[in-house]
Amino acid sequence: MHPQDTQDIQDTQRDVLVERTGPLGRITLNRPRALNSLTHAMLETVRAALDAWACDEAVTAVLLTGAGERGLCAGADIRAIHDDAKRGGAGGRAFFRVEYPLNELISRYPKPYVALMDGITMGGGVGLSGHAGVRVVTERSAVAMPETRIGLVPDVGGSRLLALAPGELGTHVALTAATMTAGDALHCGFADHFLPSAALPALADRLAAGDDPAKAVAELAAPAPHSALAEQHGWIDHCYAADSVEEILDRLRATGLPAALDAVEQLRAKSPTMLKVTLAALRRARALPSLAAVLDQEYRVSCAALAHHDLVEGIRAQVVDKDRDPRWSPAALAGVSAADVARFFEPPADGDLGLVR
Protein backbone atom coordinates (compact mmCIF):
# COMPACT_ATOMS: atom_id res chain seq x y z
CA MET A 1 0.00 0.00 0.00
CA HIS A 2 1.32 3.41 -0.97
CA PRO A 3 2.16 5.54 2.09
CA GLN A 4 0.03 8.40 0.74
CA ASP A 5 -3.00 6.10 0.64
CA THR A 6 -2.78 5.35 4.34
CA GLN A 7 -2.31 8.00 6.98
CA ASP A 8 -2.06 6.02 10.17
CA ILE A 9 -1.45 7.04 13.76
CA GLN A 10 0.89 4.22 14.69
CA ASP A 11 1.16 4.92 18.38
CA THR A 12 -0.95 2.11 19.86
CA GLN A 13 -0.94 3.87 23.21
CA ARG A 14 -3.36 6.43 21.82
CA ASP A 15 -6.94 6.03 22.97
CA VAL A 16 -8.33 6.76 19.50
CA LEU A 17 -6.68 5.53 16.30
CA VAL A 18 -7.39 7.71 13.28
CA GLU A 19 -6.33 6.50 9.85
CA ARG A 20 -7.20 6.83 6.21
CA THR A 21 -7.09 3.81 3.96
CA GLY A 22 -7.78 4.83 0.39
CA PRO A 23 -11.08 6.77 0.46
CA LEU A 24 -12.10 5.41 3.86
CA GLY A 25 -11.59 7.33 7.06
CA ARG A 26 -11.34 4.93 10.02
CA ILE A 27 -11.86 5.77 13.68
CA THR A 28 -11.03 3.05 16.21
CA LEU A 29 -11.78 3.55 19.89
CA ASN A 30 -8.68 2.08 21.48
CA ARG A 31 -9.12 1.44 25.19
CA PRO A 32 -9.97 -2.27 25.05
CA ARG A 33 -9.10 -2.92 28.71
CA ALA A 34 -11.66 -0.28 29.68
CA LEU A 35 -14.17 -1.48 27.07
CA ASN A 36 -13.23 1.57 25.03
CA SER A 37 -14.90 3.89 27.53
CA LEU A 38 -14.79 7.52 26.47
CA THR A 39 -12.70 10.35 27.84
CA HIS A 40 -12.91 14.05 27.02
CA ALA A 41 -9.74 13.81 24.92
CA MET A 42 -11.14 10.88 22.93
CA LEU A 43 -14.25 12.85 22.03
CA GLU A 44 -12.13 15.77 20.88
CA THR A 45 -10.03 13.45 18.71
CA VAL A 46 -13.11 11.96 17.07
CA ARG A 47 -14.57 15.42 16.47
CA ALA A 48 -11.35 16.70 14.91
CA ALA A 49 -11.20 13.73 12.54
CA LEU A 50 -14.80 14.12 11.43
CA ASP A 51 -14.43 17.85 10.93
CA ALA A 52 -11.33 17.32 8.79
CA TRP A 53 -12.83 14.55 6.68
CA ALA A 54 -16.10 16.40 6.10
CA CYS A 55 -14.33 18.78 3.72
CA ASP A 56 -11.71 16.34 2.40
CA GLU A 57 -12.74 15.23 -1.09
CA ALA A 58 -10.41 12.22 -0.84
CA VAL A 59 -12.53 10.74 1.95
CA THR A 60 -15.83 9.28 0.78
CA ALA A 61 -16.93 7.35 3.89
CA VAL A 62 -16.15 6.93 7.60
CA LEU A 63 -16.03 3.70 9.61
CA LEU A 64 -16.30 3.58 13.42
CA THR A 65 -15.06 0.48 15.26
CA GLY A 66 -13.83 -0.53 18.70
CA ALA A 67 -10.54 -2.22 19.52
CA GLY A 68 -10.54 -5.62 21.19
CA GLU A 69 -13.03 -8.46 21.15
CA ARG A 70 -15.54 -7.23 23.72
CA GLY A 71 -17.34 -4.34 22.09
CA LEU A 72 -17.50 -0.95 20.44
CA CYS A 73 -17.79 1.18 23.58
CA ALA A 74 -19.26 0.77 27.07
CA GLY A 75 -19.93 4.50 27.44
CA ALA A 76 -18.21 7.30 29.30
CA ASP A 77 -15.44 6.81 31.82
CA ILE A 78 -17.79 6.44 34.78
CA ARG A 79 -15.10 6.62 37.47
CA ALA A 80 -13.93 9.94 36.07
CA ILE A 81 -17.48 11.28 36.11
CA HIS A 82 -17.91 10.05 39.70
CA ASP A 83 -14.74 11.79 40.88
CA ASP A 84 -15.57 14.99 39.01
CA ALA A 85 -19.14 15.10 40.35
CA LYS A 86 -17.77 14.96 43.88
CA ARG A 87 -15.71 18.05 43.03
CA GLY A 88 -18.68 19.99 41.66
CA GLY A 89 -19.18 18.58 38.15
CA ALA A 90 -17.36 21.21 36.05
CA GLY A 91 -15.47 18.51 34.17
CA GLY A 92 -18.65 16.56 33.50
CA ARG A 93 -20.38 19.61 32.07
CA ALA A 94 -17.37 20.26 29.83
CA PHE A 95 -17.46 16.62 28.73
CA PHE A 96 -21.13 16.89 27.76
CA ARG A 97 -20.46 20.14 25.87
CA VAL A 98 -18.12 18.19 23.60
CA GLU A 99 -20.04 14.91 23.49
CA TYR A 100 -23.56 16.09 22.69
CA PRO A 101 -22.62 18.36 19.73
CA LEU A 102 -20.56 15.43 18.40
CA ASN A 103 -23.63 13.17 18.61
CA GLU A 104 -25.61 15.79 16.68
CA LEU A 105 -22.87 16.15 14.04
CA ILE A 106 -22.90 12.40 13.44
CA SER A 107 -26.65 12.50 12.79
CA ARG A 108 -26.18 14.94 9.90
CA TYR A 109 -22.70 13.98 8.72
CA PRO A 110 -22.33 14.82 5.03
CA LYS A 111 -20.68 11.53 4.10
CA PRO A 112 -21.69 7.91 4.81
CA TYR A 113 -20.83 7.18 8.44
CA VAL A 114 -20.81 3.45 9.19
CA ALA A 115 -20.87 2.32 12.83
CA LEU A 116 -20.11 -1.29 13.74
CA MET A 117 -22.04 -1.91 16.97
CA ASP A 118 -20.28 -5.24 17.48
CA GLY A 119 -20.29 -6.48 21.08
CA ILE A 120 -21.03 -4.16 23.99
CA THR A 121 -22.41 -0.81 22.79
CA MET A 122 -23.81 1.22 25.66
CA GLY A 123 -24.38 4.80 26.75
CA GLY A 124 -21.85 7.03 25.04
CA GLY A 125 -21.14 4.22 22.61
CA VAL A 126 -24.73 4.51 21.42
CA GLY A 127 -24.17 8.25 21.07
CA LEU A 128 -21.34 7.63 18.59
CA SER A 129 -23.19 4.91 16.67
CA GLY A 130 -26.95 5.15 17.15
CA HIS A 131 -27.26 8.34 15.09
CA ALA A 132 -25.07 7.08 12.24
CA GLY A 133 -26.25 6.82 8.67
CA VAL A 134 -25.41 3.10 8.55
CA ARG A 135 -25.73 1.17 11.84
CA VAL A 136 -24.60 -2.46 11.93
CA VAL A 137 -25.18 -5.03 14.67
CA THR A 138 -23.88 -8.60 14.91
CA GLU A 139 -24.70 -11.75 16.85
CA ARG A 140 -22.40 -10.42 19.59
CA SER A 141 -24.14 -7.07 20.00
CA ALA A 142 -25.39 -6.00 23.42
CA VAL A 143 -26.95 -2.55 23.12
CA ALA A 144 -28.18 -0.57 26.11
CA MET A 145 -28.79 2.79 27.70
CA PRO A 146 -27.96 1.65 31.25
CA GLU A 147 -27.95 5.04 32.96
CA THR A 148 -30.65 4.34 35.55
CA ARG A 149 -28.37 1.64 37.01
CA ILE A 150 -26.01 4.37 38.21
CA GLY A 151 -28.38 7.16 39.18
CA LEU A 152 -28.33 8.92 35.82
CA VAL A 153 -30.78 9.47 32.94
CA PRO A 154 -30.40 8.33 29.29
CA ASP A 155 -28.48 10.91 27.30
CA VAL A 156 -26.34 11.22 24.09
CA GLY A 157 -29.62 11.43 22.17
CA GLY A 158 -30.64 8.08 23.61
CA SER A 159 -33.82 9.54 25.04
CA ARG A 160 -34.90 10.34 21.46
CA LEU A 161 -34.12 6.82 20.18
CA LEU A 162 -35.96 5.33 23.15
CA ALA A 163 -38.93 7.68 22.80
CA LEU A 164 -39.32 6.78 19.11
CA ALA A 165 -39.06 3.01 19.62
CA PRO A 166 -42.26 1.08 18.78
CA GLY A 167 -45.01 1.38 21.38
CA GLU A 168 -43.60 1.61 24.88
CA LEU A 169 -40.58 -0.63 24.33
CA GLY A 170 -38.24 2.31 24.75
CA THR A 171 -39.82 3.26 28.06
CA HIS A 172 -39.32 -0.29 29.33
CA VAL A 173 -35.71 -0.41 28.13
CA ALA A 174 -34.93 3.03 29.59
CA LEU A 175 -36.42 2.50 33.05
CA THR A 176 -35.14 -1.04 33.57
CA ALA A 177 -31.79 -0.38 31.82
CA ALA A 178 -32.39 -3.57 29.83
CA THR A 179 -29.80 -4.80 27.35
CA MET A 180 -31.01 -5.32 23.80
CA THR A 181 -29.86 -8.12 21.55
CA ALA A 182 -29.14 -7.48 17.88
CA GLY A 183 -32.72 -8.41 17.04
CA ASP A 184 -34.07 -6.11 19.74
CA ALA A 185 -31.87 -3.22 18.60
CA LEU A 186 -33.10 -3.61 15.03
CA HIS A 187 -36.73 -3.79 16.12
CA CYS A 188 -36.39 -0.77 18.42
CA GLY A 189 -34.72 1.43 15.80
CA PHE A 190 -31.23 1.51 17.27
CA ALA A 191 -29.70 -0.28 14.26
CA ASP A 192 -30.35 -0.86 10.57
CA HIS A 193 -28.53 -4.01 9.44
CA PHE A 194 -27.45 -7.38 10.83
CA LEU A 195 -24.12 -8.78 9.70
CA PRO A 196 -22.41 -11.89 11.08
CA SER A 197 -19.26 -10.75 12.88
CA ALA A 198 -17.24 -12.91 10.50
CA ALA A 199 -18.32 -10.59 7.67
CA LEU A 200 -16.99 -7.39 9.25
CA PRO A 201 -13.45 -7.63 7.81
CA ALA A 202 -14.92 -8.07 4.33
CA LEU A 203 -17.07 -4.99 4.86
CA ALA A 204 -14.05 -2.94 5.94
CA ASP A 205 -12.11 -4.13 2.89
CA ARG A 206 -14.93 -3.17 0.53
CA LEU A 207 -15.28 0.27 2.08
CA ALA A 208 -11.51 0.80 1.80
CA ALA A 209 -11.77 -0.15 -1.87
CA GLY A 210 -14.33 2.60 -2.39
CA ASP A 211 -17.50 0.52 -2.56
CA ASP A 212 -20.77 2.27 -1.80
CA PRO A 213 -21.41 1.64 1.93
CA ALA A 214 -25.15 1.04 1.61
CA LYS A 215 -24.61 -1.46 -1.21
CA ALA A 216 -21.75 -3.24 0.54
CA VAL A 217 -23.68 -3.61 3.80
CA ALA A 218 -26.82 -4.79 2.00
CA GLU A 219 -24.92 -7.46 0.10
CA LEU A 220 -23.19 -8.78 3.23
CA ALA A 221 -26.23 -8.54 5.52
CA ALA A 222 -28.10 -11.54 6.90
CA PRO A 223 -31.77 -11.78 7.97
CA ALA A 224 -32.59 -9.99 11.20
CA PRO A 225 -32.45 -12.33 14.19
CA HIS A 226 -35.31 -12.96 16.61
CA SER A 227 -36.31 -10.16 18.98
CA ALA A 228 -37.69 -11.17 22.36
CA LEU A 229 -38.87 -7.60 22.95
CA ALA A 230 -40.95 -7.69 19.77
CA GLU A 231 -42.95 -10.57 21.25
CA GLN A 232 -43.70 -8.68 24.47
CA HIS A 233 -45.43 -5.63 23.02
CA GLY A 234 -48.75 -6.51 24.64
CA TRP A 235 -47.93 -6.24 28.31
CA ILE A 236 -45.13 -3.71 27.82
CA ASP A 237 -47.30 -1.27 25.87
CA HIS A 238 -50.13 -1.56 28.38
CA CYS A 239 -48.00 -1.19 31.50
CA TYR A 240 -45.62 1.54 30.38
CA ALA A 241 -48.30 3.73 28.81
CA ALA A 242 -49.16 4.84 32.36
CA ASP A 243 -48.53 8.45 33.31
CA SER A 244 -46.42 7.77 36.41
CA VAL A 245 -43.79 5.32 37.59
CA GLU A 246 -46.08 4.34 40.45
CA GLU A 247 -48.86 3.38 38.04
CA ILE A 248 -46.41 1.52 35.81
CA LEU A 249 -45.41 -0.59 38.79
CA ASP A 250 -49.05 -1.24 39.69
CA ARG A 251 -49.81 -2.37 36.15
CA LEU A 252 -46.73 -4.58 36.00
CA ARG A 253 -47.70 -6.33 39.25
CA ALA A 254 -51.28 -6.77 38.09
CA THR A 255 -50.24 -8.74 35.00
CA GLY A 256 -48.81 -11.54 37.12
CA LEU A 257 -46.45 -12.34 34.25
CA PRO A 258 -42.96 -13.50 35.27
CA ALA A 259 -41.29 -11.04 32.88
CA ALA A 260 -43.38 -8.16 34.21
CA LEU A 261 -42.68 -9.12 37.82
CA ASP A 262 -38.97 -9.24 36.99
CA ALA A 263 -39.32 -5.70 35.62
CA VAL A 264 -40.83 -4.68 38.97
CA GLU A 265 -37.72 -5.90 40.75
CA GLN A 266 -35.51 -4.11 38.24
CA LEU A 267 -37.34 -0.83 38.83
CA ARG A 268 -37.31 -1.18 42.61
CA ALA A 269 -33.50 -1.29 42.49
CA LYS A 270 -33.22 2.02 40.62
CA SER A 271 -33.07 5.59 41.90
CA PRO A 272 -36.66 6.80 42.47
CA THR A 273 -35.66 10.29 41.36
CA MET A 274 -33.98 9.16 38.16
CA LEU A 275 -36.88 6.86 37.27
CA LYS A 276 -39.29 9.78 37.43
CA VAL A 277 -36.95 12.11 35.56
CA THR A 278 -36.32 9.47 32.88
CA LEU A 279 -40.04 8.95 32.30
CA ALA A 280 -40.56 12.71 32.04
CA ALA A 281 -37.59 13.07 29.68
CA LEU A 282 -38.91 10.39 27.31
CA ARG A 283 -42.40 11.85 27.26
CA ARG A 284 -40.99 15.30 26.51
CA ALA A 285 -38.59 13.92 23.87
CA ARG A 286 -41.52 12.53 21.88
CA ALA A 287 -42.80 16.06 21.40
CA LEU A 288 -39.46 17.64 20.50
CA PRO A 289 -38.82 18.28 16.78
CA SER A 290 -35.21 17.19 16.40
CA LEU A 291 -32.21 15.41 17.87
CA ALA A 292 -30.65 18.81 18.55
CA ALA A 293 -33.65 19.81 20.68
CA VAL A 294 -33.47 16.54 22.60
CA LEU A 295 -29.74 16.96 23.24
CA ASP A 296 -30.38 20.46 24.56
CA GLN A 297 -32.91 18.95 26.97
CA GLU A 298 -30.53 16.16 27.93
CA TYR A 299 -27.82 18.68 28.74
CA ARG A 300 -30.08 20.33 31.29
CA VAL A 301 -30.99 16.98 32.82
CA SER A 302 -27.42 15.70 32.88
CA CYS A 303 -26.09 18.85 34.52
CA ALA A 304 -28.76 18.56 37.21
CA ALA A 305 -27.87 14.90 37.69
CA LEU A 306 -24.21 15.79 38.24
CA ALA A 307 -25.29 17.83 41.25
CA HIS A 308 -27.64 15.18 42.63
CA HIS A 309 -26.74 12.74 45.39
CA ASP A 310 -27.88 9.69 43.47
CA LEU A 311 -25.33 9.89 40.65
CA VAL A 312 -22.30 9.73 42.93
CA GLU A 313 -24.01 7.12 45.09
CA GLY A 314 -25.06 4.99 42.12
CA ILE A 315 -21.57 4.90 40.61
CA ARG A 316 -20.09 4.21 44.04
CA ALA A 317 -22.33 1.19 44.51
CA GLN A 318 -21.93 -0.22 41.00
CA VAL A 319 -18.38 0.67 40.02
CA VAL A 320 -16.28 1.96 42.93
CA ASP A 321 -17.16 -0.14 45.97
CA LYS A 322 -19.21 -2.66 43.95
CA ASP A 323 -21.45 -3.49 46.92
CA ARG A 324 -24.53 -3.21 44.63
CA ASP A 325 -26.36 -1.55 47.52
CA PRO A 326 -27.02 2.09 46.60
CA ARG A 327 -28.67 4.29 49.21
CA TRP A 328 -30.87 6.53 47.13
CA SER A 329 -32.12 9.89 48.42
CA PRO A 330 -35.03 10.02 48.58
CA ALA A 331 -35.35 6.27 48.93
CA ALA A 332 -38.96 5.95 47.75
CA LEU A 333 -40.98 7.22 44.81
CA ALA A 334 -43.36 9.00 47.16
CA GLY A 335 -40.51 11.25 48.22
CA VAL A 336 -39.98 12.61 44.70
CA SER A 337 -42.38 15.47 43.91
CA ALA A 338 -43.37 16.93 40.55
CA ALA A 339 -41.36 20.02 41.48
CA ASP A 340 -38.30 17.87 42.12
CA VAL A 341 -38.61 16.43 38.62
CA ALA A 342 -39.25 19.81 37.01
CA ARG A 343 -35.98 21.20 38.40
CA PHE A 344 -34.02 18.77 36.19
CA PHE A 345 -35.36 20.55 33.11
CA GLU A 346 -34.32 24.05 34.17
CA PRO A 347 -31.28 25.72 32.52
CA PRO A 348 -28.02 25.10 34.37
CA ALA A 349 -26.29 27.98 36.09
CA ASP A 350 -23.55 28.22 33.47
CA GLY A 351 -25.97 28.31 30.54
CA ASP A 352 -27.69 25.99 28.07
CA LEU A 353 -25.96 23.87 25.45
CA GLY A 354 -27.74 25.79 22.69
CA LEU A 355 -27.70 23.33 19.79
CA VAL A 356 -31.08 24.70 18.70
CA ARG A 357 -30.77 28.34 17.78
Image (cartoon, helix red, strand yellow):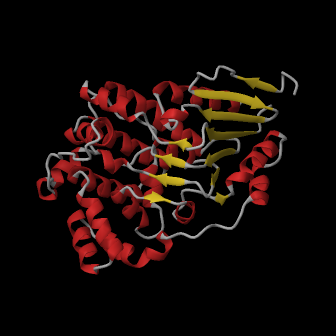
Viewer can see residue 102: yes
> Which residue occupies the extreme right position in the image?
2
| Figure check: 50 above or below 260 | above
Q: Is residue 39 left or right of residue 302?
A: right
* Residue 54 sits above or below residue 166 on the image: above
What residue is rendered at 73% in x and 60% in y?
221
Residue lying at the far left of the rendered structure: 335
Q: Quadrant of residue 26?
A: top right
Q: Quadrant of the C terminus?
A: top left
Q: What residue do we see at 28% from left, 73% from top?
A: 252
Residue at image location 55% in from the left, 44% down from the top: 70
For residue 70, above or below residue 306: below
Numbered circles on residues, count: 0
Residue drawn at x 17%, y 55% is 338
On screen, residue 94 versus residue 10, left or right, reads left
Would you place residue 184 above or below residue 308 in this image?
A: below
Q: Position of residue 91 (x, y in %)?
A: 36, 25
Q: Position of residue 32 (x, y in %)?
A: 55, 35
User: Which corner quadrant of the image does residue 14 belong to?
Assistant: top right
Judge by depth and name the residue closer to the eye, 71 or 101.
71
- The image position of residue 137, as x and y in percent, is 61, 55
Instruction: Indicate left or right for 1 with 100 as reference.
Output: right
Quarter the N terminus occupies:
top right
